[in-house]
Amino acid sequence: QTLGEKITGAMIDGDARERSGRSYPRSGAVLDLVASKLRRPLARPGTVLRLPLVERLARPDPRPIVSVVAPSGYGKTTLLAQWAERNGQSFAWVSVDENDNDPKVLLTYVAEALNAVQPVGERVFDALASPASSVPGSVVPRLGNAFASMTKPVALVLDDVHILHNQECRAALSVLADHVPDRSRLVLAGRAEPPLRTGRLRAEGRILEIGPADLSLTREEAAGLLREAGLVLGADEVTELHRRTEGWPTGLYLAALYLREGGSLPGAAAAFGGDDRLVSEYVESEFLARIPERQRVFLTRTAVLDRMSGPLCEAVLERPGSGADLAGLARSNLLLVPLDRRGQWYRYHHLFREMLLAELERANPALIPVLRRRAADWYLRNSLPEEALEYSIAASDVGTAGRLVEELTVPTYREGRVTTLQRWFRWLEDQDGITGHPLTAVWAAILAARTGRPVEADRWADVVDRWQHQTEAQPDRPVAAAWAAVLRALLCRHGVKQMSADADEAGRRLTAAGIVAPVVPLVKGIAQVLDGDPDDGDASFENAISIGDVGAPDVLAMALCERSLLAMALHDWGPAGDLAGHAGAVLHQGGIEDSYVTPLVCAVQARVHMHRGATAAARQQLVDAQRLRPVLSYALPHIAVQARIELVRVHLALADTAGARTLMREIDGVLKRRPDLGTLVSDAQALRVRLTQERGPNVPGPSALTTAELRVLPLLATHLSFREIGAELFLSPNTVKSQAISLYRKLAAANRSQAVIRARGLGLLEG
């Protein structure tokens, strides 16, 4: 066999990917998982067995964290696969890739991996699927508790964690490291130090670290690798080659193949001495120059693909027989890592792919976007639009990417992948592609409003307004225009009368487009009530409820709350209680208790409890509302003010003036930005007057936490510094410190850890 026919063993770190598998939140919104990312790679025949390292990992060890860090080509994945194969312990495996830089995506894979060993519970998947759930506040605590509660020993492996650059993902893994149960391990492998408090873990004796020196082959292992490559060398030659390559497995293997091609020992030792750059030069100058032209074209051009199948290669190369080329390479194990057990999907070894791409960029850079567009077309034809979108982005194909973002936004939002959506929106905006896709700007504004980012919501709403009001002729986009009217009504930036007019326009346009959306009668009803017409408003809410959730349980829950409040105003407490209970059940059944609607639902239920004399239940509803209150901003002013008004009433009924005054200040802040909110303005004024007459104690306690402090609180439970928390929240470290100190005082805590413990005891934090 020639160099172009066999590269196996230490060159290949296996991971596996094939499309399959789904998670199962109650809402029915499912994240389409790549099942083979959860499958541990098989130990490949012909690789050198790293027995001392495997035994070191397999023996009982009190250290719960394992860090495996080394450059590419050191056999990190191979070592872990051998350990998993020879160990009786259960392994939960996640092969990390670039798309996992969304904390909901990464942690869904972690949850699924652990769930395959022992059920982690429905509440974990509910938090993962909810678009409004806090990663540090809900997802990580639930997943951490589920991990810590596992009775079956498990090694949770995350491979290629160096790919994770999202701060929430890195912080989540750091917290997860504190929840490893007895006799279990958390294993993080990658090219760079994992996102852990490594110094502290060392000092506490809680981490086992394996680095390049450990992974470098011994002289005996090097001799074994050379024999597997079919190369017979004398003892002195093996010793010299091992010394010059410093035991780097990839360097040794390439050196062996080079020698088999007739190269000299001094040349091999010089070329493969542990330096990626030298290996790259070798691949470009020696390897690609010696193999047949057809094979060279196949290798360099398919390097644009994250994973390969025969049909995909044929489509991308536009060359019949490419599928046979892939099959031939697979049979000879040429730098290909199998991704399934059916022999259909493969990927290149990471290091080799990087080198092939570098060669393609040097030789024919203009071809790269062409190949990526062909890949996107193939994925579209095979009903895999998200993969098509990612290739379109990589190819800078703004038109196709914009159309796909528009198509994928709603299902991706329902899966809770807000970070992924924000990445797509930012990219499209950076490419000046939003103007051609106004519906995307509408979705971006609604998403920002529902997740508590009012500045961003206004910015996207301005983009939509410019699209609708610019002078040049616009192509007819009736659906975009209809949802733009819905957006204007929701944001209520121009008062209640305009909100009602926008709702009417939205209804006409959506009806013309054949779209039924309960949000239209909902916002119409809110506008009617705020304009002093509760009877017509109630009829509109009844209409919204009759439509059902239609994929929008939040809208149904809100309509139920509005009818409950109208019933309360008439002192009709029986129906009011039934409607409030139904609203809570809708959120629960939809798996979206962590929603922008939650504070309103909690407020309505708290009022019902107070009427019934169930003060303990009412207080619990106040706590639940408090956790989600930061999501309700002036971007949705009517809900934000209405929910807080009802919460103030409950706080006053409980003689909690400090909590009521905090909420009143937040109401005033919203009304300052959105002053024309109809009857809510007079309702707020009446409460304001009542508060001036209250003479009860006004010592700020937990109920007086501000929305700013409530945003900081979940991040205090992570290992992020004040500076890092500030970066997450776009605040200065000094501002974060000031908010934290105020938070400590209200929680009667002396420091950060006490504040977290106190908040958990009060139910303000999970965990």
Image (tube, rainbow, N blue to C red):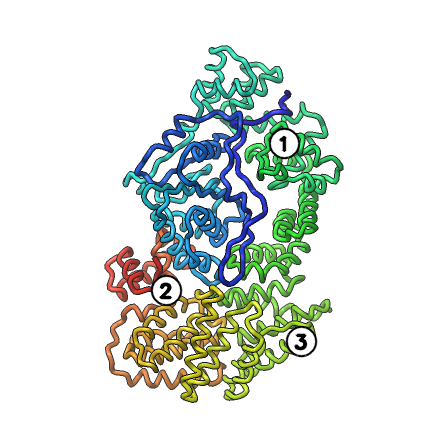
Q: Nearer the viewer, mark 2 or mark 1?
A: 1
Residue 201 in percent (x, y) is at 32, 41
Q: Quadrant of residue 459?
A: bottom right
SS at mark 1? Answer: helix
Residue 453 in percent (x, y) is at 48, 65
Under mark 2, the amino acid is Leu
Is residue 742 visible to the viewer in this orientation of the structure?
Answer: no
Q: Which mark is residue 511?
A: 3
Under mark 1, the amino acid is Ala
Please state, as top left, top right, bottom left or bottom right, where the N terminus lies in the image. top right
Q: Are marks 2 and 1 in contact (CB under 8 Å)?
A: no
- Real-space Cα distance between discs 2 and 3? 41 Å
Sooner in the amino-acid sequence: mark 2 or mark 3: 3
Position of 212 relative to 318 (above/below): above
Q: Are marks 3 and 1 in contact (CB under 8 Å)?
A: no
- Real-space Cα distance between discs 3 and 1? 55 Å
**627 with respect to 280 (left or right):** left
Q: Which residue is mark 2?
A: 710
